[in-house]
Image: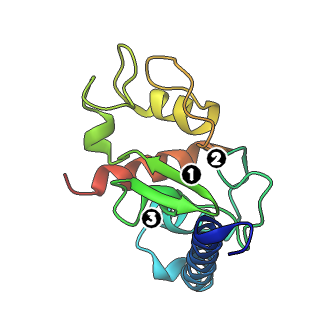
Amino acid sequence: MKAGGVRGEFRTFGALVGGLVMIMMGIALAVFSGGGAGRFETNGERIYYTGSNQDGKRIVYRGGAASGMMMARGLACASCHGSNAQGGQHQMYMLVMDAPDIRWSTLAAEGEDEHAGTGGTYDLVAFRRAVIDGRHAGGEPLNDLMPRWSLSDTDLADLATFLQSLGQ
């Protein structure tokens, strides 16, 4: 048996599957973001799924899970938090991540999830602190896997409104 054995073959297979998943996510992102604002009902929805606003401008971010890695078209909220914003465990490259539920009903529920931190619920000010500054409502730092986004006031409010529209 070769040096890596079965364990090495499993890692190679895992890397291959992870790579294919990322390629498929890139293709889906390209399809969603390529059709202009008409594919989405709101600017917030477009930002969530594509990482670009209604003007087609890419939302710039720093840090996060893909920092330093090749992302064909960049990240979007849905890249980690999923199509319904409920989060969950997923793999990005060789990294397994557990993204939290970011539906507004969850964010606004004081102390019932990891977002609230110590003594805080999410309003637009706390949401800004999380998305732009990387801090929980209670002031603690968010996980380093969460990108820090450079959103305008309008784009941030539109994104919050979209998250508020998602079901319980």
> Is residue 118 placed above or below 12 in the rendered structure?
above
Q: Residue 38 in the image: x percent, y percent?
A: 50, 82
Give the CA distance from mark 3 to mark 1: 10 Å
Q: Earlier in the sequence, mark 3 or mark 1?
A: 3
Element under label 3?
A: helix
Residue 32 picture location, percent across and down:
54, 80
Helix, strand or loop status at disc 1: helix
Q: Which residue is mark 1?
A: 155
State the residue lying farthest toward the left.
168
Up the image or down, 145 lies above or below 166; here it is above
Nearer to me, 165 or 5 = 5
Q: How is the image coloured?
A: rainbow
| Quadrant of the rendering where the N terminus is positioned | bottom right
Q: Is residue 122 above or below residue 13?
A: above
Along the viewing direction, whichever of 168 and 40 lies nearer the viewer? 168
Is mark 1 in CB contact (under 8 Å) with mark 2? Answer: yes
Mark 1 surroundings within 10 Å by alpha-carbon count, few (fewer than 14), some (14 through 19), many (20 or more): some
Q: Mark 2: give few (<14), some (14-19) or many (20+) Cα within 10 Å.
A: many
Q: Amino acid at mark 1?
A: Asp
How many numbered marks appear? Answer: 3
Amino acid at the residue labelled 3: Glu
Q: Quadrant of residue 132?
A: top right
Residue 101 circle label: none
Compute the Cα span from label 1 to label 2.
Answer: 6 Å
Query: Which label sits on residue 151?
Result: 2
Nearest the eye: 21 or 16: 16
Nearer-N-terminus badge (3/2): 3
State the residue at coordinates (32%, 48%): 103
Front of the two marks 3 and 1: 3
Badge 3 density bin: few <14, some 14–19, many ≥20, Cα 10 Å: many
Residue ID for mark 3: 45
Q: CA distance from mark 3 to mark 2?
A: 14 Å
